[in-house]
Image (cartoon, coloured by chain):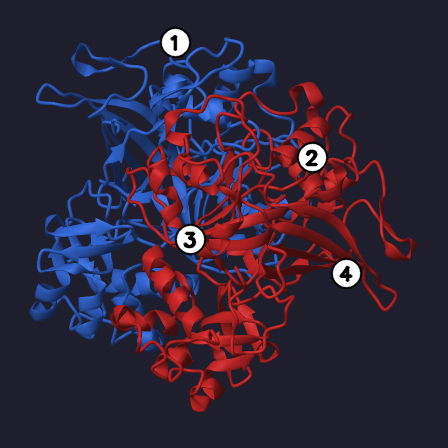
Chain colours: A blue, B red
Amino acid sequence: MAPLKSWLSIPQDSHFSLANLPFGIITSKNSQTEKRPAVAIGELVLDLQAFAHGDGFSSLPSLKDHLSVFSQPTLNAFAALGQPIHREVRTYLQNILSDTTTHPQILKDNVSLQKTALLPKHETKTHLPMQIGDYTDFYAGENHAFNAGCLFRGPANALQPNYFHIPIGYHGRASTVVVSGTPIRRPNGQLLLDSTADPKIPTFGPSRRLDIELELGCLLCKANPMGEPVPIEEAEQAIFGFVLMNDWSARDIQAWEYVPLGPFNGKNFGTTISPWVVLFDALDHFRVEKLKNETKLLPYLEEGRPDTVYDINLEVDLTTPGPEGSTTTISRGSGRNLVWSFAQMIAHHSVGGCAMQPGDLLGSGTISTKDDSGLGSLLEMSAGGKKEIMLAGMDVRKFLKDGDTITIRGVCGGEPGALVGFGECVGTIESAIVFS
Amino acid sequence: MAPLKSWLSIPQDSHFSLANLPFGIITSKNSQTEKRPAVAIGELVLDLQAFAHGDGFSSLPSLKDHLSVFSQPTLNAFAALGQPIHREVRTYLQNILSDTTTHPQILKDNVSLQKTALLPKHETKTHLPMQIGDYTDFYAGENHAFNAGCLFRGPANALQPNYFHIPIGYHGRASTVVVSGTPIRRPNGQLLLDSTADPKIPTFGPSRRLDIELELGCLLCKANPMGEPVPIEEAEQAIFGFVLMNDWSARDIQAWEYVPLGPFNGKNFGTTISPWVVLFDALDHFRVEKLKNETKLLPYLEEGRPDTVYDINLEVDLTTPGPEGSTTTISRGSGRNLVWSFAQMIAHHSVGGCAMQPGDLLGSGTISTKDDSGLGSLLEMSAGGKKEIMLAGMDVRKFLKDGDTITIRGVCGGEPGALVGFGECVGTIESAIVFS
């Protein structure tokens, strides 16, 4: 199938082809305080508030009563309209932006609306796309779970007995989920510098083992009332779309605090997501099978199809600071390295009656390849801090230094002009606060 | 000091004496959909929206620009005004309601405003007092932590090496925090019926070990930006007030799921809080010293005073269902049984830079006495399900049965007419959903 062509000029290598049309929240040079929804298309963004005000949706009557969702500072209201409406709107916008549009009067031939609604991306700023009610981080990246388990407990006990029965997850901190580009301050905390000492006495200071976690984030669009589980066959309908995610982790803080109730300050200082939400439908062409799980699943987790994860090419760059700084791609992996799908995570999360809401964020867990080419954390790349990760310019790292920038990219498909990508998820480390 | 006297008739044993004045959110018989702030006083509630509309705050000029906070469906906006304003408003209302009020024209002699603003409590309904952004549950009840640790690991290893260094906590689920009176459905989930089997194969079904956790909840009123810790000496200023909390727990689901990332579905099906927020100031007279911690604390956790927990008499009733049902008080404890204060929890929670917000809920962790008189969970009362808890009417329990009602009460002070109490935190267990 030839790629959809637009009357706009879209670079062939753009993540935001006409096949994508991801949704985000912007402000612009001309309207710096009013956050509003937009769609990314090539090097432009379509301001949906301006588009709606300019009668852009006049040929989509079913949306008539819902246009206020495009005057909101988050995508929550649009998401809550449900997948059938997202589908209609995205298909409609693909038509409007296509060179064979059946509604040329709406935008293609409407220079005045083009001027108000089509903005150069570099004149806009992106913001957190949704108000996140609750954030849950899963652990579905089997290779990462195995690698991390080996470092802590050895290969024989790397994965717990529950691992292949349950999509293991924990509640994260919603208040510190931030949009790409937000600086991340190195956390201070309790560190056990000598774990063999008896008694164990922690010291206080900046984390010395500051790490990344390469994840896929899933944003929800559907609520289930408390006490009413989401059946597995309906779970995909609760998915609004996907973002890249970096679940920054302070390994030393985490190691001392996490028994018996799980990660806390080792994680809650910041989680970065990419700004453009790639809608559920946009990834449909890139479904692949999950990692094989030989375990017989309980029925509430059994999916009707095996291809419920996505073939997303993932890359992680580490850029060192300063004028001499260099950029090295330290990981090249794929979104297919998950043993649980988001539908299974949703079914499990709600099976006891937990209420989910539009704007909830689910993290996949760290995504690593089986070999060393696409590991999702520095912990794995440095074998627990035992070996150095080689960077360009003769530099090395075990964990992050102040000023380091991490850039995650993710893109599906290889056909020029038809890429479905996430853009970038970026964060730079600021030095820790000095306690007096 | 003689108790403050009101021109209203307040029962001597009321939790809501003039010394208290807790804040909540109500609807009423006459206005069933409009949620708005109110204050509980004896058997009445003062509707703050009606009071403000009727110029009730006209003698408190500093509040003039903030009256819209009383037309909100949650207390978040009022809380965000900060402790000095809460103090002014509560002191002002104590004056207005006192029999020696200096502003009798406001309410005491204003029969018309009394009619619109003073409502019989039984004609009102309470709702969740705040929109809860993030909910964190701590583990500061040393006796409970020890008892639970003994059941799982024996007395020698009951408490982890980090326990006396860190106020251990984990992120909970905000979407299922509900107000007293909301039914709690027994969760289904994965259960490992035979934990000695190899391999370990879970079954699916309703939790058989459904439990309570008696806790104190702390609601926050102050935000700190991401990356900027709250110093311990300022941490109490972030406290809006306190509620009773029942952190319902499915012990069997929790036992199978919780390694390595902590409790998840074993907890997230429901957490009940009492509806009336007892303000920070109202508890000031009831400060007592925390449980002794022999460990040298890191400076960021060192408090300037030792009396940072509260002498709250706590009781738990279990009421069995049906016409033959009986009520037994199964626990009589005290809020003093904490080894960490909420100020320490806030300082620790934010020390790595985690952003806190008005409306965040912190749970103390289960509060148990050292002896068996005031245990905070059935797990402890039944010694891990090994012995029966005796109830009135020859009935017994190890864990909760369908239809059981748990009522938690908490009250400070013993002087008639001057009690500062929380009222009740109630929940009844509904039977689990039947999966086909």
Image coords of residue B147 (percent x, y): 69, 32
Dot 1 corresponds to which residue? Answer: A386
Q: Mark 4 or 2 closer to N-term? A: 2
Look at label 1 and name its amino acid.
Lys
Locate residue A48 relative to residue A65 in the image: left or right: left
Q: Are marks 2 and 3 on the same chain?
A: yes
Picture layout, residue A265 above or below residue A361: above
Label of residue B370 in the image? 2
Q: Nearer the viewer, mark 1 or mark 2?
A: 2
Dot 3 corresponds to which residue? Answer: B133
Q: Which structural element holds mark 3? A: loop
Q: CA distance from mark 2 to mark 3?
A: 33 Å
Q: Residues within 10 Å of mark 4 (few under 14, many from 20)?
A: some
Q: Residue at x 47, y 16 (%)?
A: A201
Residues at circles 3 and 1 in contact by the CB criterion of under 8 Å: no
Q: CA distance from mark 3 to mark 1?
A: 39 Å
Q: Residues within 10 Å of mark 3 (few under 14, many from 20)?
A: many
Q: Residues within 10 Å of mark 1 (few under 14, many from 20)?
A: few
Quadrant (top left, top right, bottom left, bottom right) of the C terminus of chain A: top left
Q: CA distance from mark 4 to mark 1?
A: 56 Å
